[in-house]
């Protein structure tokens, strides 16, 4: 990309409320913004020498020192953008204010190889025509594509700030998805981070909230990058003035009805005085945030290992072993529960919801605000989404394989089974061999990998079963066997007599949240024949074997 054209510079001069001087000051501030992008397209800008490189050699924790030079700010943006691949397309969220404007120009200077597309989101909460005009003018000056998206902000709890933020991010993610763009940049500064941490502190946040905003995170398949997060707002303002750029001032930044404005103008100055001497509250809060993120990441990694050990997936549901969960430190057990809740679509659990889950007693259940269900029983905590579709009924392919897509499992049926041995012409023909009895073939495990049983440590049957020729004889008459979800009134004749299927699932300690997804194999009369991993219809061991079934992971799924 070439330097900003004259038409683009004129557009900048006529749009927005000026924060800095004119662009004639650019010559003394280090040359034209953007420069000759064609000449620079093969490489990103290397870090400058001198003071900036010494700062990079020993990277400070949290915010960078105040008073950064232009080159030092470019170096920091280059460092922050290192994860972005060469030549990638990047959506730059530009409000028209100083921070996002500076971000767009700093990225253009430091990473001329990137294809920048500026996005301005209009909330409609106030007259923002000048904001949009300024953002469009900067896009023209940088010779970048410009997108303008309008959103409807539904104001309610927790307030207009949060509602506008949610709508803005939604628009950015939608724009990225529409263009198959993987990278979005946001212009938050170190001062924004300090304000965020402060507001999280007063609402009683835990370690994750104290960590504030992350410099880089992934959401909806998009990488969200904040390249200015370690740079002070005052330094960003100096860059705007030094480059002669125009930016608009958002009046809500001084609105005392806005929580962030009160934190910025009322609380932070008091904390600065409380620190005494040359106190640096912005630096201190940023340092605390980064240290909290370091600890959070370590605890999250440990919790992920424990979740893989404690949590069992069964279709869309999850079950967590209570005995093992209770052995963990609270910092890990709460993370296991939060991770499991996210896995079933329950979202991020607040601390009070986690406390209520931990307090559940056997037989109790908790309906979360997202509609998800958490049940306690049989030594398990079961997690299910708000609306679990019971296992769909499928006619068994006999012989053959029937796939249960909701579970990622296959039901295999061999019939007739076992097959009679092939006749050996060298042997005297003594007539057909006597059929094998159930007792004789009961331990003949099917080939391949068997599926794991439904969650539950109670009395168990195997994930394969053999049936007598009396049971399978119905197949010769052309009737169908099926597999389906449990139904009210289901009963199974097993070793202990005829029992309710509900009681068998309870005795097997299958979590309540998982029971509608346990497959029930039924005969031609729709009567339960086998509940894989739980119970099987009782048969006479002396009877001739006629059929074998087993459950295995669907081929190609892990």
Image: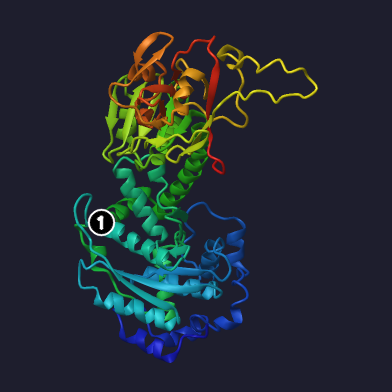
Whether 167 is drawn above or below 527: the answer is below
Residue situated in front as seen by the camera: 255 or 179: 179
Where is mark 1, residue-wise? 163
Residue at image x 25%, y 77%? Answer: 129
Q: Specify few, some or many for label 1: CA neighbours under 10 Å numbering under 14, 14-19, or 20 or more.
A: some
- Which quarter of the figure has residue 513? top left
Instruction: Report the side of 472 relative to 205 (left or right).
Output: right
Instruction: Tell me the element at label 1.
Output: helix
Residue situated in front as seen by the camera: 554 or 201: 554
Whether 490 is drawn above or below 151: the answer is above
Which part of the image, by quadrant, shows the C terminus?
Answer: top right
- Which quarter of the figure has residue 390? top left
x and y, in percent, of residue 175 in the image: 38, 66
- What colour scheme has been applied to the protein in the rendered image? rainbow
Whether 87 is drawn above or below 555: the answer is below
Residue situated in front as seen by the camera: 278 or 422: 422
x and y, in percent, of residue 422 in the image: 70, 26
Can you see residue 278?
A: no
x and y, in percent, of residue 251 in the image: 23, 68
Instruction: Report the side of 267 relative to 290 (left or right).
Output: left
Residue at image x 29%, y 26%? Answer: 365
């Amino acid at each position: 990309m070439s330097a900003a054209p004259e038409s683009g510079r004129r557009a900048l001069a006529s749009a927005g409320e000026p924060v800095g001087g004119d662009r004639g000051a650019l010559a003394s501030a280090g040359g034209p913004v953007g420069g000759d992008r064609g000449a620079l397209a093969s490489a990103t800008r290397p870090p400058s020498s001198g003071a900036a490189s010494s700062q990079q050699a020993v990277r400070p924790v949290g915010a960078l020192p105040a008073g950064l030079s232009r080159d030092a700010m470019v170096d920091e943006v280059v460092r922050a953008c290192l994860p972005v691949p060469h030549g990638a397309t990047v959506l730059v969220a530009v409000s028209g204010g100083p921070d996002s404007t500076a971000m767009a120009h700093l990225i253009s200077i430091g990473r001329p190889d990137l294809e920048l597309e500026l996005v301005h989101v209009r909330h409609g909460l106030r007259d923002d025509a000048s904001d949009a005009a300024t953002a469009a003018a900067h896009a023209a000056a940088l010779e970048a594509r410009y997108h303008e998206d309008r959103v409807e902000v539904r104001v309610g709890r927790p307030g207009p700030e949060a509602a506008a933020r949610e709508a803005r991010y939604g628009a950015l993610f939608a724009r990225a998805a529409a263009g198959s763009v993987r990278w979005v940049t946001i212009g938050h500064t170190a001062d924004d981070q300090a304000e965020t941490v402060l507001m999280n502190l007063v609402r009683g946040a835990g370690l994750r909230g104290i960590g504030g905003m992350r410099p880089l995170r992934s959401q909806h398949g998009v990488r969200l990058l904040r390249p200015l997060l370690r740079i002070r707002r005052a330094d960003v303002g100096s860059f705007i003035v030094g480059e002669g750029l125009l930016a608009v001032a958002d009046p809500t930044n001084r609105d005392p009805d806005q929580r962030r404005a009160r934190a910025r103008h009322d609380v932070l100055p008091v904390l600065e005085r409380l620190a005494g001497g040359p106190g640096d509250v912005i630096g201190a809060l940023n340092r605390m945030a980064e240290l909290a993120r370091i600890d959070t990441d370590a605890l999250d990694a440990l919790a992920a290992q424990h979740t893989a050990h404690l949590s069992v997936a069964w279709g869309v549901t999850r079950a967590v072993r209570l005995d093992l969960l209770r052995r963990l430190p609270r910092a890990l057990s709460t993370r296991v529960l939060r991770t499991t809740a996210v896995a079933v679509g329950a979202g991020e659990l607040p601390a009070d919801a986690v406390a209520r889950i931990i307090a559940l007693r056997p037989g109790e259940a908790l309906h979360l605000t997202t509609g998800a269900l958490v049940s306690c029983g049989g030594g398990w905590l079961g997690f299910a989404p708000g609306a679990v579709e019971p296992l769909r009924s499928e006619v068994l392919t006999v012989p053959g394989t029937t796939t249960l897509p909701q579970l990622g499992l296959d039901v295999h049926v061999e019939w007739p089974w076992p097959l009679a041995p092939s006749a050996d012409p060298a042997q005297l023909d003594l007539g057909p061999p006597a059929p094998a009895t159930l007792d004789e073939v009961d331990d003949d495990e099917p080939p391949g990998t068997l599926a794991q049983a439904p969650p539950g440590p109670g009395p168990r049957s195997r994930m394969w079963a053999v049936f007598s020729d009396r049971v399978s004889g119905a197949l010769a008459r052309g009737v169908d066997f099926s597999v389906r979800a449990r139904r009210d009134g289901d009963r199974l004749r097993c070793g202990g007599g005829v029992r309710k299927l509900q009681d068998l699932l309870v005795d097997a300690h299958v979590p309540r949240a998982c029971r509608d997804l346990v497959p029930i194999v039924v005969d031609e009369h729709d009567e339960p024949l086998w509940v894989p991993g739980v119970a099987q219809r009782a048969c006479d061991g002396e009877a001739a074997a006629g059929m074998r079934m087993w459950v295995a992971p669907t081929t190609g799924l892990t």
